[in-house]
Image (cartoon, helix red, strand yellow):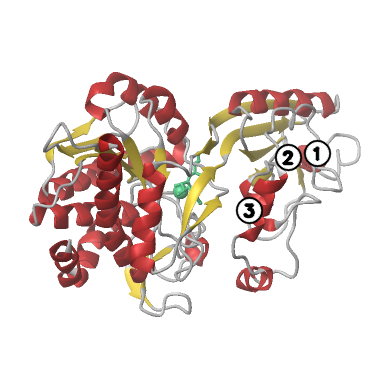
Amino acid sequence: MEKVQKYIADRKNAMVEELNEWLRIPSISSLPDHKEDMYKAAEWAKAALIRSGAENVNVYKTEGHPVVYGEKLTDPDKPTVLVYGHYDVQPVDPLDLWDNPPFEPVVKKTDIHPEGAIFGRGSCDDKGQVFMHFKAFEAMVANNYLPVNFKFMIEGEEEIGSPHLGKFCEENKEMLKNDMILVSDTGIISNSIPSITSSLRGLSYVQVEVTGANRDLHSGTYGGAVANPINILCDLISKMMDENKHITIPGFYDKVMEAGKEEREMINKAPFDLEDYKSKLDIKEVFGETGFSVMERTGIRPTLDLNGIWGGFTGEGAKTVLPSKAFAKVSMRLVPNQDPKEIAELFEMYFRSIAPAYVKVDVKYLHGGLPVITPIDTPEYKAAEMAMEKTFGIKPVSTREGGSIPIIATFEQVLGTKSVLMGFGLDTDAIHSPNEHYGLFNLYRGMETIPYFFKYYSELKNSALNS
Ligand code: BES
Ligand code: ZN
């Protein structure tokens, strides 16, 4: 293990250069114009896995963006770990809010990252975190330290809900067969307080369209007599939440698994500084459902948010128009046992029921994913805990995160195995935002922690077998 750690320590600077090559490929999964870039980013991952020492590395075509798979199987008696991550990234707009171009990565120091952070789309979510696994693996192969069988699956559609990965898993069950799945696509509380994610929210994403008249109208000639779909859309959306920020869609909470007293106490025990939270975001007050703390609101409660709203005239200056149409993108974060499609149906029923007769409405389901809870009393979780304790010098706490990784629930259903969510990002790393970055501290600490994870996991697994 010492040699493994030294291998990593000796190569730190060159590693950043290597990761930057990957970050320069604009692999935005949601935009059709970037289809070629998806192949380029997948091919880059394939080459990186081969360089690191993986075998049988291939780029697999799917009906969507390709999946990269590689492995290093040394002994059928060792446990097999599947490392999952994604090479696709979110769109970059608004582009003018980036201090540096999103696909021209640079290292800059910040207050939170005094030793520097790589700024660029995908640096934290998730290329940088996948790259930690490539390098930790490389160091282990180079030193012939292989306590487990390794499998890697890096996909290109996580940011759009992994629509084709479930089928890929179904069709390649044998190849993907594993004892556990290790994922670094989440965060830690801070660089001095490590944590392991024990649950993720699900997601139900819909797009709504409200139509008034059959064409845009002069707002003087018709204004006051014909409905303005933008006004109506705002009205409808404002009816979706009451004054306690409780979502009003009938049936929305019916299946919510309410957290017990003990669980809520545990969530609220995790280190959290409200003043610091507000000051970092430059807000005077936090928002949310009455009766729940910030940690509960993001960890165990569902939400309804507009992600975009448009219609009418948004160019410079003024134009007097009653638009014919208005649109909004709506995402609802879900908690166990809410179902994305069911929730989208409830949304649609309610939206239609409150829409006045002077507009037509349409609701489209875009994508979704199930929430997950990962157990914290397993050797897998324990290994992650021990590895982080080893490198951070303090025992990690377990946190319930608000983001989603839709394929995790599918893994459990199709491959029958559980995941450990051991990520190293920070909430302040601006994922999905302009100026996304990933701390060099986090990048290196991740690389150092991952080999320990494999060491402890194999030891715990072996001792469980022998007892
Ligand atoms: N890395 C995130 C998930 C995440 C974010 C976990 C923050 C924990 C904390 C992932 O890449 C992501 O953004 N997922 C999407 C999924 C969606 C598009 C289906 C998300 O959560 O919005
Ligand atoms: Zn993401």
On screen, residue 398 versus residue 289, left or right, reads left
Q: Is 436 rendered above or below residue 130?
A: below
The x, y position of residue 78, in whole percent, is 19, 37
Percent coordinates x, y for residue 132 in the rendering = 28, 57
Q: CA distance from mark 3 to mark 1?
A: 48 Å
Q: Quadrant of residue 278?
A: bottom right
Identify the disc placed on residue 323.
2
In the rendered image, the residue lying farthest to the front is 467
User: Farthest residue toward the top?
Assistant: 171
Of labels 1 and 2, earlier in sequence is 1
Q: Of marks 3 and 1, which one's residue comes earlier in the chain? A: 1
Determine the secondary structure under disc 1.
Answer: loop
- Looking at the figure, which quarter contains the N terminus? bottom left
Residue located at (24% from left, 22% from top) = 174
Rendering coords of residue 282 (x, y %): 66, 72
Instruction: Identify the residue shown where x is 20% and y is 72%.
Output: 13
Residue that numbered label 1 is attached to: 228
Q: Nearer the viewer, residue 198 or 43?
A: 198
Q: Residue at x 47, y 31 (%)?
A: 409
Three-letter amino acid code at the position of disc 1: Asn
Name the residue type under label 2.
Answer: Pro
Ligand 1 within 8 Å of disc 2? The answer is: no
Q: Indicate which label's residue lies in the foreground, 2 or 3.
A: 3
User: Label for residue 266?
Assistant: 3
